[in-house]
Amino acid sequence: MANTVRVAAAQMTSINDLASNFNTCSRLVKEATSAGAKLLCLPENFSFVGARDGDSLTIAESLDGPILKRYCSLARESKIWLSLGGFQEKGPDDAHLCNTHVLVDDHGNIRSTYRKIHLFDVDVPGGAVYKESSFTIAGNDMVVEDSPIGRLGLTVCYDLRFPDLYQQLRFQHQAQVLLVPAAFTKTTGEAHWEILLRARAIETQCYVIAAAQTGRHSEKRESYGDTLIIDPWGSIVARLPDRLSTGIVVADIDLSSIDAVRTKMPISEHRKPFGFWKSASQ
């Protein structure tokens, strides 16, 4: 594996039109491959954002359905890995789906699937009320996958607020690059998006790739945007200059820099094991 690998993260405004969103993603894939990227990260809900409650349930499909097959073919034809964040995977019944982060390799094969663990049931201050759990089944399993870009830890959006998940991805599962596809609300994005992402990078000493939805999807829904790639020291190494635009950012992942940061700041040697805090309170 080469020490330096180029990656890209996409920003877009998905709508309730599968074909339109696929066309946008196809264009972004072409931009990423032209830039020499080996992995393109697409944001949460890349393939569809409903205009009305329940729309996502009507288009939810299994992982071997026609929607995802088109994206797998796109990865294969473009010879690029795709991080497909937040796919509407059909759930156990007609009233539920899974918010599934699908990792596809450059042969078009699904390598890993992560089902979002933390569901967004929040009354956003000054904004809308969200209850993701009313139509989504939460996942239970952490997921990591080896790739040409390093060892990837998969997460989705609201997971970002729960540092324990990221700590375990790094210290128990040896993640090097954390993927955070998202559709943060405008209110929460303005307040916390960059801060949380940089904190996750600093405390895990991993690269963080955060592909974001942006702008107004419908009358009811608006996303913050601000797609970022952050290095293990917490520095922003790529950022779309226009927070509301559709496009990609590109950065070179330097795996040797991960080792350098971890050697100079050896938190893995100093941190307490996960069971320490429980035993200390008894």
Image (spheres, rainbow, N blue to C red):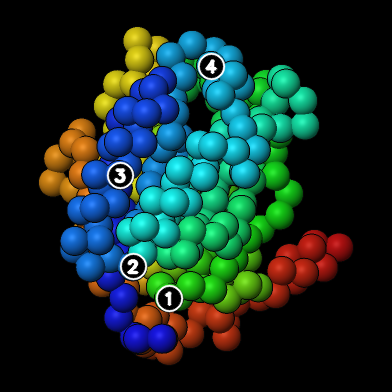
Q: Are marks 3 and 2 in contact (CB under 8 Å)?
A: no
The type of residue carrying mark 1 is: Pro
Q: Locate residue 158 relative to residue 114 in the image: left or right.
A: left
Q: Is residue 221 above or below residue 117?
A: above
Dot 3 or dot 2: first in sequence order is 3
| Residue located 41% across and 37% down the image | 46
Kind of residue at disc 4? Asp
- The residue carrying mark 1 is 148
Q: Which residue is mark 3?
A: 26
Name which residue lies at 79% across and 63% down: 278
Q: Residue at x 56, y 24 (%)?
A: 59
The label on residue 55 is: 4
Q: Earlier in the sequence, mark 2 or mark 4?
A: 2
Disc nearer the start of the sequence (3/4): 3
| Amino acid at pointer 3 | Ser
Callout 3 secondary element: helix
The disc placed on residue 62 is none
In the rendered picture of this protein, how many numbered marks are placed on residues?
4
Mark sitting earlier along the chain (3/1): 3
User: Marks 3 and 2, how far apart in space?
Assistant: 15 Å
Picture coordinates of residue 269, whole percent (x, y): 57, 85
Q: Secondary structure at mark 2?
A: loop
Q: Where's residue 51, x and y in %?
A: 43, 14
Q: Which residue is mark 2?
A: 38
Q: Earlier in the sequence, mark 1 or mark 4?
A: 4
Q: Is 203 placed left or right of 114 in the picture?
A: left
Using residue 76 as the reference point, say whether residue 272 is left or right of it.
right
Q: Is residue 182 visible?
A: no
